[in-house]
Amino acid sequence: MSGRTNARLSDLFGLAGWSKGELARLVNRQAAAMGHPQLATDTSRVRRWIDMGEIPRDPVPRVLAVLFTERLGRVVTIEDLGLVRHGRAGKRSPDGNEEHPDGVPWASGRTAAVLTEFTGMDLMLNRRGLVGAGAALAAGTTVLSGAMRDWFHTGPAPVADAPHSLDTPHAEPAGFDRYEAAPLGSQEIEELERSVEVFRAWDAARGGGLQRKAVVGQLNEVGGMLAYHHPPHLRRRLWGVAANLAVLAGWMSHDVGLEPTAQKYFVIAAHAAREGGDRPRAGEALSRAARQMVHLGRPDEALDLLKLARTGSGEEALPRTRAMFHTVEAWAQASMGRGQAMRRTLGLAEELFVSDRGDVPPPSWMQLFNEADLYGMQALAHRTLAEFEPGAAVQARHYADKALALRVDAQQRSKIFDFLSMASACFIGDDPEQADGFARLALVSMGSNSSRRTWDRLRQMYRLTAEYAEYPRIRELREEITLALPRPRQPGGRGETAARA
């Protein structure tokens, strides 16, 4: 017992709106449903958990995680509740703090358990028809960048320290199936790696909504597999699969507007990549979190994350990987109206991209960042800057045209973004006739895509049509867009807050 308020539990308790007596009764009822009828919690115990920082014994933390998950409609883990017992309780590491003694969101060696718990709760929400409550994103700088900066530059726990048997004590919340994992061989891991490629291709073509649950389920199974001892070379590959699936789960969650859930998956992915010794992969996971921050209007936090991604990836990162980091950085700078910095950063991205001789095969997770994506990001950055400097719309059209010339049907979502970048740039450049054509191409394509981000970007473009609302074609376009746009989620209802246009 720390003698101090458990701030995490207190905050979530306030959001849930229970009384302490009501929570005590719910804990007893849920514990009985989970096979622990002997549990007898009362109001005074709940008060000690919240006000005195007492950490209850198992199964209470798991019970609380289930209750808060169901109440808030988003995944709430034991870590989120501040109920994890650390082996160094009461001590500080030089770079850590009391809440996270290891200076990170969780201690090395806990990644498989956290992964399994979080995906299990996410699947439970999927099955019960809940998609997440309107919860605020954790601050990117404090939770991701600040907590992980020193951790990124240290090595993970030795592979030999990994558990030799299934031992995930916090991975049994009610509501998801118990998966009995088993040790794997190289053939099974190859099959898992191929499944990642299938999921990645589907996401690029159709958006994250249709396959998100399948990816989360696969990641949950991999978490069970990681609880077994494997030879070092197989374990590294299995951590690579976990990192790739976690990035996909995060990106798909972001794609459908589940923002806090997406952020947690990006953190899990960075942990998994680091456990497997792949620092560039960990850096790329953080760059995804940075893109999410720019999309949500928080470019300053995106820049902090990108700085960590670049320095943490080290010399192992290929030039093309570093080029990708710079394109996201340029988008963040454009969002802040920093045109000179944006152009300089895009120049660095181009230099790095062309300097990649291809003598080292890119990792699978970089194969989708090709020349078309480079042009697409350049178009997006210039289109974003055009809100501050209208003259940038000319360059936005130039790069969007080059991107569209190279896009293939398998990159349908990216084509939609390019159409919208082009349409927006045309409106800003006082060319409503061309803008109408590209806007309609985007609108037609969006009907078969499950990406909420494309609708967010459409709303941004729709705002630009107001100046031309008296033109008959644009008036019709505005009406069609109004009819096609999904209805906004109601504040306070079920559903994490969608990205603001």
Image: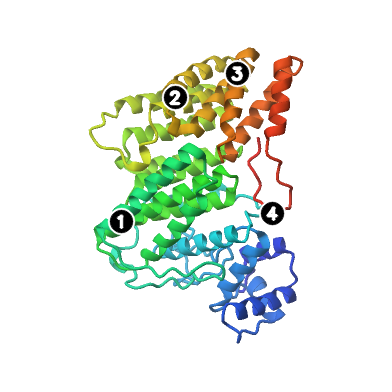
The amino acid sitting under disc 2 is: Tyr
Q: CA distance from mark 4 to mark 2?
A: 37 Å
Q: Which mark is residue 189?
A: 1
Q: CA distance from mark 1 to mark 2?
A: 34 Å
Q: Secondary structure at mark 3?
A: helix
Q: Which mark is residue 375?
A: 2
Query: Compared with residue 482, is residue 387 higher up or lower down, i.e. above or below?
Result: above
First along the sequence among labels 1 and 2: 1
User: Is residue 7 something one can see in this rendering?
Assistant: no
User: Mark 4, mark 2: which one is toward the viewer?
Assistant: 4
Query: Compared with residue 162, is residue 35 higher up or lower down, i.e. above or below?
Result: below
Circle 3: is it few (<14), some (14-19), or many (20+) Cα within 10 Å?
some
> Residue at the bottom extreme?
38
User: Could you tell me which quadrant the N terminus lies in?
Assistant: bottom right
Circle 4: is it few (<14), some (14-19), or many (20+) Cα within 10 Å?
some
First along the sequence among labels 3 and 2: 2
Q: Secondary structure at mark 2?
A: helix
Query: Residue 205's x, y, as percent?
Result: 47, 37
Q: Which mark is residue 494?
A: 4
The amino acid sitting under disc 4 is: Arg
Q: CA distance from mark 4 to mark 3?
A: 36 Å
Query: Residue 127's x, y, as percent?
Result: 58, 60
Q: What residue sits 50% from the left and 48% below the top? A: 211
Residue with the mark numbered 3: 437
